[in-house]
Image: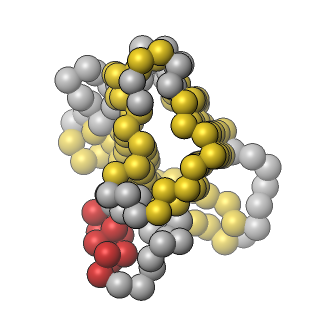
Amino acid sequence: MRGKNPAAFDLELLNPYQGIDASQNERHNIRNISGQPPRRGIWVDAIYDIGRIENVHFNPWWNSHNKAYQWQTANGEAFIFGRADWEYVLNTFCFGYHVGYKFVETATGVQRKFSRNRSGPAPDASASTVTARAPAQVVVRTVIVRL
């Protein structure tokens, strides 16, 4: 996705090695995406105006019982954020990935402002743990907590 106002709406991504590259653009809009990209779901970097990611759910719908899925749980990253001056993220979910949300420093810089909102309560609620892997890199792994 490049340029001004690129958009990806209403897509199912079943087994693309990498999902959506939302880097080097302004005001991207990613909405209503589902699927199972094994390596990387959405990559965001070099965003200099507000980007939006809404209603994105990555689950093991394509495969959850063989070596490909085992590789994904050991190596897959669902949402990776480099430099974005403001990223608005609403109603996102991932399951079966090594890392759910990853924030990294790239040549363009680091995440400036990040807004993540969830919709109302559900039978399962998500909690997060934060682990520092390198001085400028933070990894958020999603953890499901049964209420």
In percent of the image, x 30 and y 36: which residue is there?
Answer: 104
18 and 95: which one is in front?
18
Res. 122 visible in picture: yes
Residue 96, given in percent of the width and then of the height, sits at 45, 68
Question: Which image quadrant for residue 144?
Answer: bottom right
Residue 129, given in percent of the width and then of the height, sits at 46, 54
Residue 27, compared with residue 105, is above or below; it is above
Residue 31, given in percent of the width and then of the height, sits at 62, 40
Left or right? Give the position of 139 relative to 118: left
View extreme (bottom): residue? 65
56 and 126: which one is in front?
56
Res. 131 visible in picture: no
Query: Image quadrant for the N terminus?
Result: top left
In percent of the image, x 72 and y 69: which residue is there?
Answer: 147
Left or right? Give the position of 81 relative to 14: left
In percent of the image, x 53 and y 65: which residue is there?
Answer: 59
Question: Which image quadrant for residue 118?
Answer: top right
Residue 119, compared with residue 46, is above or below; it is below
Q: Coloring scheme of the render?
A: secondary structure
Left or right? Give the position of 2 relative to 9: left
